[in-house]
Image (spheres, rainbow, N blue to C red):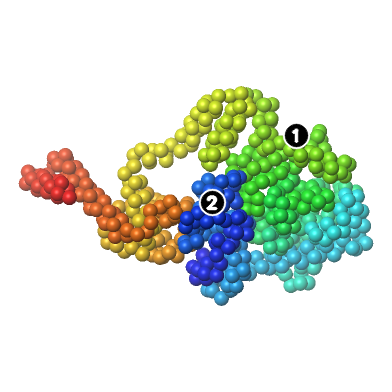
Amino acid sequence: MKNNDVIQAIKSRLSLADMARRYVELHPAGSRLVAPCPFHQETKPSFSINEEQGTFYCFGCQASGDIFDFYGRLNGLDFKETLAALAEEAGVRLDSYRADPKAREQRSQKRDMLKMHELAASHFHSNLSSPTAAACRDYIGERGISPELVEKFGLGWSMDSWQDLGDTLRRAGFNLSTAAECGLQSKSQGGRTFDRFRNRLMFPIRNLSGQAIAFGGRILPALARDDDAKYINSSDSPIYKKGEHLFGLFQARPSIAVKKSVILTEGYMDVITLHQYGYTQAVGVLGTALTPDQIKRLSGFSSSLELMFDGDNAGRKAAFRSCEMLLSRGLSCKVVLFPDDNDIDSMLHSFGADAVEDLRAHAQDGLEFCISVLRGMAPRDAVEWARHFLSQVDMPELFHRFAADLAAGLGLSEADLRGGVLERRSAAAPRAQERRSTAPRSISRDREIMTFAVRYPHRLPDLQAAGADLALREPWALKLWDKLAAACSEQAFDDLDPKEKTFWIRCRGQEAPPLNDEEGELNAIRQMLINLQKTSHMASVVAALRQGTASQETQREYMRALLEARGRRSDQ
């Protein structure tokens, strides 16, 4: 649970505008501060900060929120990580606030797991100097990895032993069952623990704070047996989710900040080789297909990426899929195409950085690369891909540009391409369309009530007295009302989800009417509710009359009530 005391203490000490200036150049525009959005590719100043409210909003990609949302999104952190980072910067002690005992126990377990991983990283690294690691040292030398890179990435060696790391962890007082839970140990069917990584070159995977959270282990070619997997990787654990992290991001972060771009590649050795040749902005996808969580993390550092995958068919497929995901989410990308079956290692070691620089100079724009791939596909498959891709693009300026480029590149009618997308979007949300067609008045009423509630949360008691909460019908409005009622103050913002925060900012932002007619807006809501009550009353009377089962006297009473209600309504 978020602690509002902690959040408010941090907000009182840190400024969103000051934080944003670290990443973008802000310019005053009336009462706002504006800049090109740091979250998607653009040059126009669509990113806006309201200093008084401490919120931001982008009119292009609709990113919105407060300093926590801004910092977390830029650095690819979840809320807990963001809270810890900003608390440290603001000088706010998190342990001075009351916490859920269960949450405290989970944090304690995670701290132990992090300590175990740090000990394991140090243990593996020290193993490199042992006599049994000669083959590993030879392999590192053959791959051209310098001692500086070995230290920078903390490379290590796991002994050909079932208990080498386990004994080290046990001597340090750690529970080996917990070590198995976080992937450092494995368990036999009989419950005995043993080292997961054995006889391998070890690559520590670090989070953005530099803490070891997982490992990758490569079998050495000279020691590999037929049934040995080339790589063994840590499984997901309480401190590591493979689809959320990128190898080398901690080491590449300073360079990315200077170069304003990221080189994205596949494996551990690709990243290290690129760093060896000066491409210190390189990161790797940890042996999986690129994930939305990884894109979210990358977008916080740069909206411009270069894809460097192997030149074989699998590498081109990976680049094609990555381009689709990056472009549809508003990031720009280029594809560095390696000739034939060459990869990063062979290009750099055989031909040097000059050859790679030449390839980079001729790199294809991400969409151009996709079009070149589509031209080699069956026409029906190419059109299907293009329509599916466009259906994922929410930003209008990108949608129009991508649609035009795809139509021209594939020799299609842009109208036909767009039409297919509109049909797809219509089919994807039939229930939402049905709700919009059958209940427009309910949606409009709920939005009108919640707009006032968000603009003046301290007036919720007045709204409730007028029956506003009883008039709400839409789930989103009922949920937002409950959150506002629980806080009944400006602090409600801290407990909102992203969509609710966007609604809040639109209701109170620069494009909204000024907050200077509180009573007038409240009276308008009251009058709307009075009219609603009369309409509902008349509908009930009419329904009773139509049933025709009541006595003659009861029907006369119904008719009298109906005429009275209509009379009152006409008098308003």
**Circle 2: residue type:** Phe
According to the picture, the residue beneath numbered tag 2 turns out to be 47
When the figure is inspected, residue 12 is found, relative to residue 22, above or below; the finding is: below
Q: Residue at x 26, y 51 (%)?
A: 528
Question: Visible in this render: residue 63?
Answer: no
Q: Is the Cβ of the residue at disc 2 closer than 8 Å to that at disc 1?
A: no
* N-term mark: 2 or 1: 2
**Circle 1: residue type:** Asn
Which structural element holds mark 1?
Answer: helix
Q: Residue at x 72, y 70 (%)?
A: 174
Q: Give the crowd class for mark 1: few <14, some 14-19, many >=20 residues within 10 Å.
A: few
Q: Residue at x 41, y 38 (%)?
A: 433
Q: Position of residue 424 (x, y in %)?
A: 50, 33
Question: Visible in this render: residue 428?
Answer: yes
According to the picture, the residue beneath numbered tag 1 turns out to be 313
Give the number of marks: 2
Horizontally, residue 26 falls left or right of residue 470, namely right
Q: Position of residue 543 (x, y in %)?
A: 19, 42
